[in-house]
Image (tube, rainbow, N blue to C red):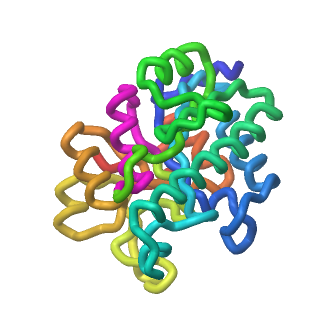
Amino acid sequence: MDTTNPIYKRIILKLSGEALGGPAGMGIDPEEAEKIARKIKQIHDLGVQTAVVIGGGNLWRGAAGAARGMDEPTSHHIGMIGTVMNGLALQDALERAGVVTRVQTAVQMNAVAEPYIRLRAIRHLEKGRVVIITGGLGTPYFTTDTAAALRASEIKADIVIKATKVNGVYTADPKKDPTAQRYDKLTYQQVLKDKLQVMDMTAFTLCEENQMPILVLDFWNDDDLLRAVQGESGVGTLIS
């Protein structure tokens, strides 16, 4: 066990489904799952209690199905099931890396995953297990960002870490505007005033109301996740 002291005791890590996909962000790539598992293991080895909320966009997007004429709740339910598939793939990668992991789901599938039960999730974390929370909120129309915001408050996490491919929140899209500046810190009010893209509005409002900090960072950049939980400055953008 690493003796370096992390600044967070318990976190929610919000991962997109695309993180598990191959180059096109589609399907489940076992090598990508292993890369994610290694990064989670780094912070787990510091003693950080880690819960992961994972999306399903690599397999299915509820809104896209509805846009093509599908019944919208049905389309969203397909997406929820996709998040369970992603959770099982990530569990496999973590277990093979030596990290004891539990998958919980808001859509009950007792043969493959535990139902999401708040106190059971907390107990797993206290016992040093990684908990992967899937199935969104178990109801259509809510994103996995919203699930991450709500679960973070429920399990009394210290922070929601949103894993992206950009190292924080910028004044504009840095891929389109080379003059875009990265924010080190923001208040909830600044995000709303400047209409900055952090999370969907429901998720963001939940975090604001519950005073849940959000850290947006580049999950794929070297050891940014590890550095962030160790309290290094200049990693991502902190909203609080």
Using the image as rendered, state which of residue 73 and residue 16 is in the foreground: 73
Q: Residue at image x 41%, y 52%?
A: 145
Q: Is residue 65 above or below residue 231?
A: below
Q: Residue at image x 47%, y 77%?
A: 174
Instruction: Judge from the rendering whether residue 238 lies leftward or rightward of residue 112; answer left or right.
Output: left
Using the image as rendered, state which of residue 239 and residue 93 is in the foreground: 93
Is 148 one of the magenta-colored residues?
yes
Q: Is residue 58 above or below residue 156?
A: below
Residue 105, percent across and down? 52, 37
Q: Which residues fall within the magenta stretch?
A: 142-161
Residue 218 visible, this orientation: no
Instruction: Judge from the rendering whether residue 198 lies leftward or rightward of residue 236; answer left or right.
Output: left
Q: Is residue 157 above or below residue 165?
A: above
Instruction: Judge from the rendering whether residue 49 lies leftward or rightward of residue 203; answer left or right.
Output: right
Residue 10, percent across and down? 47, 27
Where residue 196 sits, quadrant-wise, is bottom left
Q: Residue at image x 67%, y 26%?
A: 45
Instruction: Judge from the rendering whether residue 44 lies leftward or rightward of residue 22; answer left or right.
Output: left
Residue 68 visible, this orientation: yes
Where residue 112 sits, quadrant-wise, is top right
Image quadrant holding the C terminus, namely: top left
Using the image as rendered, state which of residue 176 and residue 153 is in the foreground: 153
Q: Is residue 98 above or below residue 228?
A: above
